[in-house]
Each structure stands twice: as structure tokens, then as C-alpha cells.
Image (spheres, coloured by chain):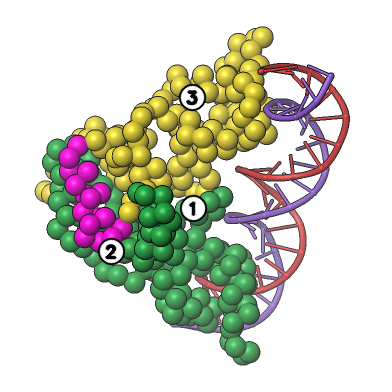
Chain colours: A yellow, B green, C red, D purple
Amino acid sequence: MGKYQTEQKKVLVGFMKEHPQEQYTAEELSALLEERTPAGGQAPGKSTVYRLVSELSENGTLRRFPKSAGRGWTYQYHHAEGCSEHLHLKCMKCGCLLHLECDAGKELIEHLLNEHGFMIDNEKTVLYGLCGACRRLTIPYVKDKNL
Amino acid sequence: MGKYQTEQKKVLVGFMKEHPQEQYTAEELSALLEERTPAGGQAPGKSTVYRLVSELSENGTLRRFPKSAGRGWTYQYHHAEGCSEHLHLKCMKCGCLLHLECDAGKELIEHLLNEHGFMIDNEKTVLYGLCGACRRLTIPYVKDKNL
DNA sequence: TTGCGTGCAAAGGTTTTGCATGGCA
DNA sequence: TGCCATGCAAAACCTTTGCACGCAA
């Protein structure tokens, strides 16, 4: 698996690379590729999409997240380097993925290791919450409640 | 849902409470309750297990985690209080759940909010990695490789 | 007594798999 | 040319749902 560079794989990876902020389920991805691939292009079939997202998640091209509600997973293009060195923040509202490359993040990682003996896996760990932009949208409600 | 205190619910919650460090899928839980409930006890059927873990995860009695490999979810008893105030660490090997109630955790939470505008959701977030005990087991291998 | 919770079995949705064909190197 | 990847359809898998009955309050 993964030895050949097929047209279907190029189409899928190309699409994901063009939408690095978006996350899709295998099902959505299959449908999108089907409808968006220009005539003559070779959109992968559904089972191939499943096989590809699985392969690409393992080799690091994509990243897999549990769906915030319900069951299943979403996939997102994984473009950054050095991602095993820092923590990641994912907004539950807009889905954006932030790389926490500041000292505070590094300090926590070291603190966990030195003081708690816990070695964090940055590839697997995601901090969920609300990003600044999405949080601002909710502030009016908060204000009304005198909070 | 949740108005009556049925025998089946008591059995399920009782079992989970007795195994606060363990995590089970709905399927596993159903099988375990089936075989472990003493004769005369009322083990819930499979569909009831699904309904119960869903209800109990929503009201906070249980906590739901994405399975580390493959699809699906695992459930674990959620015994602590004030869990929305601190981060949690989960060992990917033994499955233990640690509550990070120290200052370093609090500082990161505040840092994220003040410097990055990101409001973390501590109920949803879990930091994955290896706990001290499990890490020690792997150290011999690390040493052999001169790391 | 009331109506919620349960169990069974069937339905539903998603993901995987077997096998023949087609394509990449 | 040889082997890998794909596509289709069927199978497998997991979870939810409909309905009639039993039990908690």
C-alpha cells in the first residue's frame, strides 16, 4: 500500500492540500471529489477514499480527529513540520487547528515529564475549545448575562 | 429518560464505579455485565447498555473517549469533582486517567485564554501520552539505544 | 395506575473486504 | 511485465429504532 502514485491519490491529496483548514469525513470527501473533479479527472471511488484516508493518516499526510458529535472521524490536511514538538488547539466551532509553538506550551510538556512523569504524545493530543474569533461571537451573550 | 432508578441502571453504574480505572466499549460492557451479574441480578440487554452509556455520558456519570485505534468509543466512570477546572492526562498504554490539578495546568489554561484568545474545554480535552509507570517499562529499550 | 425503561429483533448507517480489472513503475 | 491499487457489490460491523411488555414511582 502506498507504493504507487496513482491518479486517485493525487486528486485526493491535491484537494486536501487546497483546503488545509477544512475537515471532512470519508463520506463527504468521497462526494466532494466526485462532484468537483473536472471531467477527465479521475475521482476515487468510495472504498478507495476509505483506503486512502486510512493510509494517509498513518503516514502523516492527513490527521484524523474524532467527530465532535456523534460517531465517526474527520480528516484534515496535515501541512506543518515539527508537529510532534508542540501542542495543538482545535476550535470546536470553526474547526481551525492552531499550532501552539510558544514557550508556555513547551513548558507544560516539560513540566508533565519532569514533575508528573507523563510523556505526552503531541501527534495524538488535541486541546479542544473555542478560538478567539469564535469566542468573540459569543461574547454579546455573555455580556447580557453580566458575566 | 433518567427518571426511574431501574435495576439495570444500578447494575451498570455499580460495575463502572467498581472499576474506575477501566474503560469499556458498549459491547464489552454488555458482555461483562451479562457474565458477571450474579444469578438473580438483572443485567441490562445490549440496546439498554447503549442507551445507558449515552444517558450517563451526558449527565456526567461516565466519560466518553475515542478509541485510540479503530473506530468507536470507550466509556469510563467519571468520579471526580471540579473536572471542568483542570486538564486531564490519559495513558495510552494502561488507560489510567490523571487529573492535572497543579498550577502548571492552570497557568496554561490562563495563558491560552489571555495570550491566544483560546478558551479550552476541559470536559472535552484529554492529553494523551504515557504515564510514569508505563514509561518506566519502556526505558530499558530506550537505554539500549543510547537515548 | 401511569408512563417510562426494557428487550428483542429488525433497520440503519458506516466501514471493510473479496475478487476481477486496470494502471503504475 | 509484474504487482499494486481500484471499483463494485456484498459482507461485516456497530449503533439506533419500533413496538409490546414489565416495572418504578
Three-letter code, disc 2: His
The answer to whether marks 1 and 2 mark residues whose Cβ atoms lie closer than 8 Å is no
Q: Is residue B135 magenta?
A: no
Range shown magenta: A102-118
Number of other residues with Cα within 10 Å of mark 3, as a class: few under 14, some 14 to 19, many 20 or more: many
Residue B25: image quadrant is: bottom right
Give the residue at x 45% y 29%: A77
**SS type, badge 2:** strand
Q: CA distance from mark 1 to mark 3?
A: 24 Å
Residue B118: image quadrant is: top left
| Residue bearing mark 1 | B68
Give the residue at x 28% y 64%: B99
Give the residue at x 34% y 72%: B79
Three-letter code, disc 3: Met
| Residue A118, x across and y down, in percent | 31, 58
| Residue A5, x across and y down, in percent | 62, 21
* Disc ID at residue A44: none
Q: CA distance from mark 1 to mark 2?
A: 19 Å
Mark 2 chain: B
Number of other residues with Cα within 10 Å of mark 2, as a class: few under 14, some 14 to 19, many 20 or more: some
| Residue bearing mark 3 | A16
Three-letter code, disc 1: Ser
Q: CA distance from mark 2 to mark 3?
A: 36 Å
Mark 1 chain: B
Q: Report if residue B63 is visible in the image.
A: no
Q: Is residue B38 above or below residue B131?
A: below
Q: Is residue B120 above or below residue B38?
A: above
Q: Is residue A107 above or below residue C10?
A: above
**SS type, badge 3:** helix
| Residue bearing mark 2 | B99
Q: Earlier in the sequence, mark 1 or mark 2?
A: 1
